[in-house]
Image: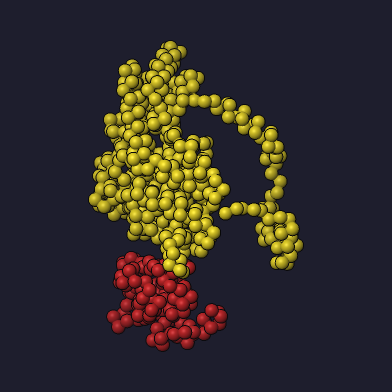
Chain colours: A red, B yellow
Amino acid sequence: MNSPADLKYSDSHEWARLENDGSVTVGITWHAQHLLGDLVYVENPSVGKEFSKGAECGVVESVKAASDIYCPVSGAVVAVNEELSSSPEKINQDPYAAWMFKLKPSNPAELKDLLDAAQYEKLVAENGQ
Amino acid sequence: MPFIPHTEAEVQAMLESIGVSSIEDLFQEIPAKLRQIRLDEVPSGMSEMEIMRLMQERAEINGRSLSFLGAGAYEHHIPAAVWEIATRGEFYSAYTPYQAEASQGTLQVLYEYQTMIASLTGLDATNASLYDGASALAEAVLMAVRLHKSSRRVLMPRTVNPIYRDVVRSIVTNQAIELIEVPYGLETGTTSTEWLEPFEGSDLAALVIPQPNFFGVLEPVDALTRWAQAHGALSIGVVNPVALALVRPPGQWGDSGADIAVGEGQPLGVPLAAGGPYFGFIACKQAHVRQMPGRIVGRTLDATGKPGFTLTLQAREQHIRRSKATSNICTNQGLAVTAATIHMALLGPHGLRSVAAHCHANLLSLLARLDKLKGVARRFSAPVFHEAVLSLPAAAADILAEMRIGGILAGFDLSEHYPELGAAVLTCVTETKTASDFDRYTHSLERAISNVLTITT
């Protein structure tokens, strides 16, 4: 298990980081990529599209499963990591460097509702996964 | 792969093993009122002898007709070897195999099939078939909407087979997808880009482009494909696989090709039968492959480096992704596809081209004869493949009924689906017809018109 202390986490295994410019960077956790196995495809949302917290906004596909990505906080997509379309394996190599997309949050207070690293690790341990 | 049902002893052993006393117990969670076991309207079973006699009698009612019916299903010569090989024990299953370790032969045939369809359509990727042409078009519409992301509106020309349009409507309308009908030119019988002008500036997911269209007429596919691309819509070709041996494939339409192509596979070695089984094909550009539904066979290397075949890109299919799958296609028309693969392999590219050329030449021969009949005229001016719409001087249903008495199925009555065309039939000619058949058709039509006009005046 590897959960950096400076990130926030959702119970659906996304991580979120509030940047200095007010945007929120989103990716999937080490635990998520470990469960999925070798990733072969990443479907990111389109830039400009708005999502509410918890909405399906992308798909990550491995050799054995395809899983939805849920938006950790409400907001509009301002950037996507284009590198992942040709190199999805970057997520397996370093899930916290290989971000998926950045949001301009419409309600930054929602970040407080997310889990911190210790809470997230506890959640994973309790689920026995 | 053999399919052998379980014996009663095996069923009991399995039930004991999981601690359940009867099969019925496995269905406990289904409410009792839904577990209807009495089917009052279904008659009891018949013996093999009785059913053989019944079916022979039914077949005799059909009789033997000289058929000029097309309208979506086409009579072609099928070499005797096709079904002789397809019905061998090694192939004789409708199932698309999951188990690579037990199904290398079948998987290789399906891979060859995919290669042939990709080659015919000029597109990058295909799957191992869908149910039929109509449901293939519905899958293409769903696929286009998934790919487009922002729009759920699809332009559907009226020159698309009306039965396909009905099927697509049934499948997609409850998924909040809007189908917008596009009119056609009454002179040309084609969908012109001028009819698309009202939709400029609106967000559209896709434009459907039939080639040839339901009237047998060749559409201006380059202009239509370019229009779709210029307006941010995907283009979906609906094509006849035999015609593709002569006309440019969807992969070469416009500047960068159609995005998706679908069609009915029946003309490739599957005999005419009411209700099928037929099969549908679908092909797309590489960039769209992850939204393509159904089974896809891929070639790979095994652990020892030897080439082999296996199902691939399955993570989005129903056995893994359940309700969020790209489709519910699972087992489909594997046997019909096996026959089509053998059919195409026996004909080869030259053979298929020859079939298509004979179809077209034969239609022109028939049309030249009909040209001399008073009151009979080709309805549309645009070039055709192997079907054409004929205007008749009296109600099409009456004339078709007269010709049927003489053993000729002369065409498809268009009055139900296209009342604006008046008395009109869609007539099809394939390579199976000869000069004497055309003479017989011509004389029969002349006599039928005369009889109908005499009765009605």
Q: Residue at x 74, y 65 (%)?
A: B16
Left or right: A98 in relation to B329: left
Q: Residue at x 37, y 55 (%)?
A: B125
Q: Residue at x 45, y 54 (%)?
A: B108
Up the image or down, B31 lies above or below B376; here it is below
Q: Nearer the viewer, residue A128 or A36?
A: A36
Up the image or down, B206 lies above or below A97; here it is above
Image coordinates of residue B237 in percent, x first then y, are 35, 46
Quick check: can you spot residue B397? no
Quick check: can you spot residue B110? yes
Q: Residue at x 35, y 24 (%)?
A: B366
Determine which quarter of the picture holds residue A79.
bottom left
Left or right: B184 in relation to B170: left
Image coordinates of residue B441 in percent, x first then y, are 41, 21
Q: Nearer the viewer, residue B108 or B144?
A: B108
Image coordinates of residue B456 in percent, x first then y, are 44, 14
Q: Nearer the viewer, residue B166 or A31?
A: A31
Determine which quarter of the picture holds residue A68.
bottom left
Image coordinates of residue B412 in percent, x first then y, are 43, 29
Q: Quadrant of the C terminus of chain B?
A: top left
Q: How many marks?
A: 0
